[in-house]
Amino acid sequence: MKRIFLFVVAASMSLLAEAGGLMTNTNYHIAFDRMFARGATSEIDATYSNPAGLVWGREGLQLSLNFQKPWQNRDIEANVPALGLNKTYKGEASAPVVPVLFAVYKQDRWAVSTMIGIVGSGGFVKYDEGIPMFTAPIMARLGAAGLQPGTYDLDAQMKGKQYIYGGQVNFSYKLTDYLSAAVGLRANYYDGYYRGHVVAQGGPVKYVNLQLDCSQKGWGFNPLVSVNYHQDKLSLAARYEFRTKINVPNDTKELSADVVGMSPQQVQAAFGDKIAAYQDGVKTRYDMPSLLVLAAQYEFTPKLRAAAEYHFYDDKNAKMSGNRQENLEHGTHEVLLGAEYDINDRFTVSLGGQRTDYGLADDYQTHTSFACDSYSLGCGAAVNLTKNVRLNVSYFCTLYSDYKKEQANYQGLPGVAGSDTFSRTNHVIGLGLDYKF
């Protein structure tokens, strides 16, 4: 039973430490959801995507309130023939309706703007049947102890939350008739928790009872700069966001482990290094990477506009828990394309696409935090309800490429070959209102 507990602790701690993934969000305004390539716009969503471009926009005060509802699954298909394990573990990731507020005031050659929303992560994930990193090692060790499936009960559950709330302020200025620049600062607040348990029981005997309840909260700040060249029908823009260092301490309400036949002192002596990262007060890094954006937009006709955009996230230099960022092959590359067409003075329709390449590698992928390269497609419309009020609606979905990871020693089990296939789905609907005073 001691060996069983070692595997349970190692599995559960790794699980909870690395819940989450690459940290940055970009879809704040509904105009992004329906077009994607917004990095050279001068409308109110430029508060995030192109602050320097706001000086080419409308005079006076503007407000925008946006709501999005995402649905996502994160599934792991485990195939380990030696253990008789061939199962898909369903992970449901969810978030409530996500609001974002924009405000801009422009006068002549300058503009001041702000944005408040969820700028990183954002949601909950729950595996009701545990995950393979729990079940596979425990199945192997219980089998070695003479306990076959059906003779014991294993209750394992993991759930986690990650939100990074952000508040951003920008100052934009028109330097010449064709060139503008902006500087800004964003405050980021991380709020997350890891809660889980592992209980292995046979009849009246509870072999293992592990309980964890750990919350994390912390602040980080990052400056950002942008420039915009705008002449007639052409707009060229560049934006750079500096890395955000977020180092959060644990507020651990419960971290307990009971093992049949071992005293608390023996458990601590044998396995203290496994649970050290979750002790109260220990700090964990959740940096948001620096981001470079290059974008271009062109007005082909008075009714038709198209745009192209490139993003580079320097994820390899943004620290994560356990320095997982070092396992990436490169930072994240994204290419975005979009177009919108004014049917008439009242209705606008748009379409966009995005390709994301994370630079993934086997050693980066874990059962608690995995990513999949993807294509995203979005569409939607804008309706001018009055001369001052605009309604935006959108839908976009993300098409992920499955990632298969082969292991000669599955989850550290010597000589036990197996594989994991990671897959994800994502759908988002959005609704927003822009108001011009």
Image (tube, rainbow, N blue to C red):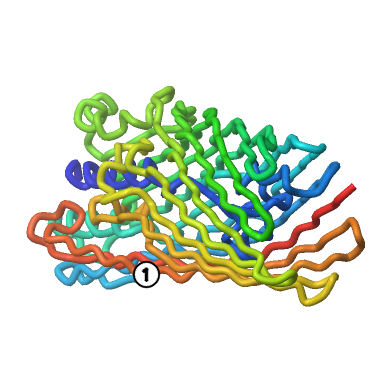
253 relative to 421, above or below:
above
User: Residue 153: x, y in percent?
Assistant: 33, 59
Residue 321: image location, x then y, percent: 35, 37
Q: Which quarter of the picture shows residue 395?
A: bottom right
Quadrant position of the N terminus in the picture:
top left
Q: Say whether residue 183 is left or right of residue 84.
A: right
- The residue that appears at 30% across and 67% down in the rendered structure is 421
Answer yes or no: is residue 396 visible: no
Q: Which residue is mark 1?
A: 401
What residue is shown at x 49% (from left), y 48% (from top)? 293
Q: Under tag 1, what secondary structure?
A: loop
Left or right of residue 384, residue 195 in this image: left
Query: Which sits in the foreground, 11 or 437?
Result: 437
In the image, taking residue 12 as reference, residue 341 lies left or right, namely right
Residue at 80% x, 72% y is: 347
Using residue 6 as the reference point, say whether residue 228 is left or right of it. Answer: right
Which kind of residue does numbered mark 1 sit on? Answer: Ser
Q: How many marks?
A: 1
